[in-house]
Image (cartoon, rainbow, N blue to C red):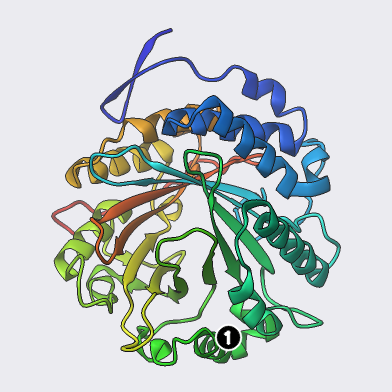
Amino acid sequence: MRTRISGGVPVTGSPPDILPDLRSGTLGALTRAQLVGLCDVSGLSPADTETYAHTLVEALGPAAERSLALPPPTRTFLSDDHTPVEYSLSFSPGRAPALRVLVEPGCGADTRAENGRIGLDVVRAMGRRWDFSTERLDEIEDLFFPDRPKGPLALWIALELLPGGVPKVKVYLNPAASGAKRSAKTVRKALRRLGHKKAYAALPKADGHPFLALDLGHWETPRVKVYTRHLDLSATEAGNLSRTGSGPGPAEIQEFFRAAAATDDLDRRPGLSCHSFTERETGRPSGFTLHIPVRDYARDDKEVLDRAVDILRSHGMDPAPLVRSLPALTTRRPKDGVGLIAYLALVHQQGHPPRVTAYLSSEAYAVRPPTKLRHRSAAEV
C-alpha cells in the first residue's frame, strides 16, 4: 500500500494491477472489473457488487464476450471511443457518492431497429426481475421505435446502484428516431401522453433535443427528463436556462460553468441542459441540470480532475471518492489523456440539496491524447 496525492487529495491504495491484463481480454471482463472497483469506491457491499457486476455483463449480451482486440461492436454515441458503457458518480454533501452505470444493451446489433428491440427486451426483463412496471415506456414506444429508426441511438439503460442489490432504473430514448426535424414534435407528443401537457412550453430555447429519459421502477417521485442542446453556450446564457423557479440561481450556475469549463463560452462541443418533470398541473419542471463537456475544454484529465476537486469542495462535498475512482478505470496517468472525465454536471432536484455529478469513461478501445488548448485566466473570464 502507498499514499498518493492527486488533486490535493491524499489517496491510500494501489492502482488495480488486474486492468492491464484485462485489456487484452473481453469487453465484459474489463467493464466488470471497472465496475467492481467503482463499487468499492462508493461503499457497496461485496454481495451488491457481485449482483451489479453480473447485471452489467448480462445487459451487454453477446458483446460482453467480444475481444478488445477487435473494434467496438458498434459506433455507439454513448462514448467517444464507442465503448457501450459509461459510469458516473453523483455527489451530495455529507453522503457517499451514488454510483451509476449507463449501458447500451443492443450495442452488437446489425441495425438500429434491432438495437432498439434488444434494449426493450432487456429493460422488460429487468422489470420482471425487480418487479417494476414498464407501462410508461409502453405508452410512448411507437414514438421512439419506428420501423426504420434514425438518429444516433435507440435505447440506453441507466442503473443507479443502491445498497440491497435492487437498482433504480432509467431509460434514455432518441427523439430523432423519426428524423431530426421531428424531434421537437416527438418530445411534445411524448410529454402529452405521459400527462405533462404544459411541460414542453416550459423548456428553454435550444438547438436540439438529444434525449428523453424516463424513470422506471422504485423511484419515490418518477421523472420525465428532457435534455436540450445549446450551441456556443456562454456562462451568462447558461445562468438563465433553468425554469424550475427554485434551486441554484443564475450566479451559482455561471460560477459552476466557469469553474468546470475554464472559459466563458462553449465554442466546441455544446453544453446540455436537462429539465425533469414530476407534477402535471403547472408544467413547471421540478429539476434542472447543466452538463459541461469538460473533455473538450481541458488539456488533460489532470486539469479536469483539479477543477472537479475544487468544485466538489466549494459545494461541501468530499472529492476523495472521485480521485479514487480513476485508478479503478485505468492505470494510465490523468495527464496522459483527456476524456476519462467526460462531463461535469450541476444538478438540482426540488426538495434536495444541489448535487455534482462526474461522468466517467471506460476507455475500453481508445485513449484520447492530451489537447493543446489556450485557456483564459480567471481575470480574462
Q: How many marks?
A: 1
Q: Residue furthest top?
A: 1
Q: Does residue 223 appear to the left or right of 126 in the view shown?
A: left
Q: Nearer the viewer, residue 164 or 76?
A: 164
Q: Residue 180's image quarter?
A: bottom right
Q: Nearer the viewer, residue 83 or 90?
A: 90
Q: Residue 10's image quarter?
A: top left
Q: Does residue 86 appear to the left or right of 378 in the view shown?
A: right
Q: Does residue 215 appear to the left or right of 357 in the view shown?
A: right
Q: Residue furthest right?
A: 110
From what the image shows, is residue 143 above or below residue 372?
Answer: below
Is residue 333 visible in the rendered structure shown here? no
Q: Residue at left 44%, top 92%?
A: 197
Percent position (x, y) of residue 193? Answer: 55, 88
**Which image quarter is the N terminus in?**
top left
Q: Nearer the viewer, residue 372 or 223?
A: 223
Percent position (x, y) of residue 315? Answer: 20, 47
> Could you tell me which secondary element the residue under label 1 belongs to?
helix
- Judging by the rendered image, the residue that carries numbered circle 1 is 183
From what the image shows, is residue 51 above or below residue 58?
Answer: above
